[in-house]
Amino acid sequence: MAWAMLVASGLIDVAWAYAAKRSAGFTHMGWSAISLLLLAAFIILLTRALQVLPLGTAYLVWTGIGAVGTLALGAIMFAEPLGGPRLALAGIVLLGIAGLKLAD
């Protein structure tokens, strides 16, 4: 269950990044409110997962999900560039996450 909470927290982190960008520096109240709710949700799930999982492994997996997910979201939603080097480096992050999970 802790791994599921960690993954959910990472995915909510991606949604939070999207809402934070759409809030335009907290000038749009609706997106600002969504951003703050998502922030609270991912922190609650992350801290609950950390009660069971090792800190270093959990934080690395969580950041990797957030980083790779936000990279993909930026490319899809905001037409941010996603060339070969970025894809290769994101792949390395994913391999590291898989390796840490398998090492447990």
Image (tube, helix red, strand yellow):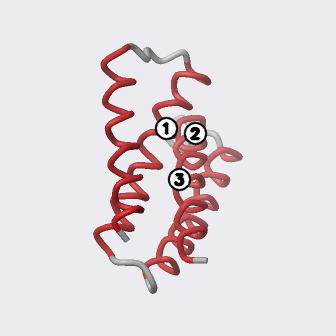
Task: Kindly identify which residue carries mark 3.
Answer: 13
Amino acid at dot 2: Tyr
Task: Kindly identify which residue carries mark 2.
Answer: 18
Element at label 1:
helix
Residue 57, quarter of the rendered image: bottom left
Residue 60, quarter of the rendered image: bottom left
Marks 1, 2: nearer the viewer: 1
Mark carried by residue 14: none
Which of pointers 1 and 3 lies earlier in the amino acid sequence? 3
Q: Residue at x 54, y 43 (%)?
A: 20
Element at label 2:
helix
Amino acid at dot 1: Thr
Which of pointers 1 and 2 lies earlier in the amino acid sequence? 2
**Labels 1 and 2 touching (C-beta < 8 A):** yes
**Labels 2 and 3 touching (C-beta < 8 A):** no
Task: Kindly identify which residue carries mark 1.
Answer: 70
Amino acid at dot 3: Asp
The span from disc 1 to disc 2 (Cα, nearest Å) is 8 Å
**Labels 1 and 3 touching (C-beta < 8 A):** yes
Whole-percent x and y of residue 102?
A: 40, 62
Whole-percent x and y of residue 44?
A: 55, 75
The span from disc 2 to disc 3 (Cα, nearest Å) is 9 Å
Whole-percent x and y of residue 69?
A: 51, 40
